[in-house]
Amino acid sequence: MARTVRWAVAATASVVAFGVGLWLAGSVFSGWLPSGEAERWAVAAAFATIAAGAVGAPLGWWAGRETRAGGRVVQRATARDASRTVQIGGSRGGTASRPSGDVEQQAESSGTARITQIGGDQYSGGR
């Protein structure tokens, strides 16, 4: 699910929880509220805010999680005789990093063929 959709779900659920909390405080728990109009609204709004926070906190965590970006890399190679095959799932050179998606590599060789498979980036720098 896209990150913006997750945030929209979290925000919508929090707003709905606030509305339900306000309604509950005004109708179901009305016997427990103070008698003054301003005080009733203040207590009802506080209750609704707590309800929205209880719903919004875990959904905000879920919406803000990083997900693996990128697609799936599938590489297949066949090497024969004295050929050489290199498969790199990421980029070649630069700095080392994790692949941005799933990497699947399959290879077959025969004779004196050589196959090199690298699931992520091929890091060529030294430290």
Image: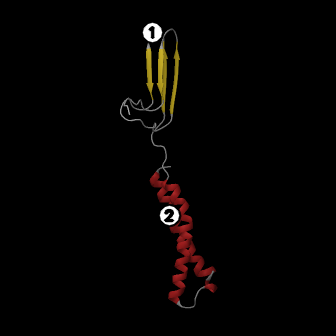
Residue 120: mark: none
Tag 1, which secondary structure?
loop
Q: Is residue 35 above or below residue 66?
A: below
Is residue 92 found left or right of 24 in the rendered image?
left
What residue do we see at 63% from left, 85% from top? 32
Q: Nearer the viewer, mark 1 or mark 2?
A: 1
Q: Position of residue 85 (x, y in %)?
A: 44, 18
Q: Quadrant of the C terminus?
A: top left
Q: Give the vertical position of 65 relative to 52 (above or below).
A: above
Point 53% across, 17% down: residue: 108
Q: Identity of the amino acid at label 2?
A: Thr
Q: Which residue is mark 2?
A: 12
Q: Residue at x 53, y 55 (%)?
A: 62
Q: Amino acid at mark 1?
A: Ala
Residue wearing tag 1: 82
Among the two numbered marks 1 and 2 on one chain, the one whose residue lies closer to the N terminus: 2
**Residue 117 image offset from top left, x and y in percent:** 48, 24
**Residue at the outermost bottom position:** 36
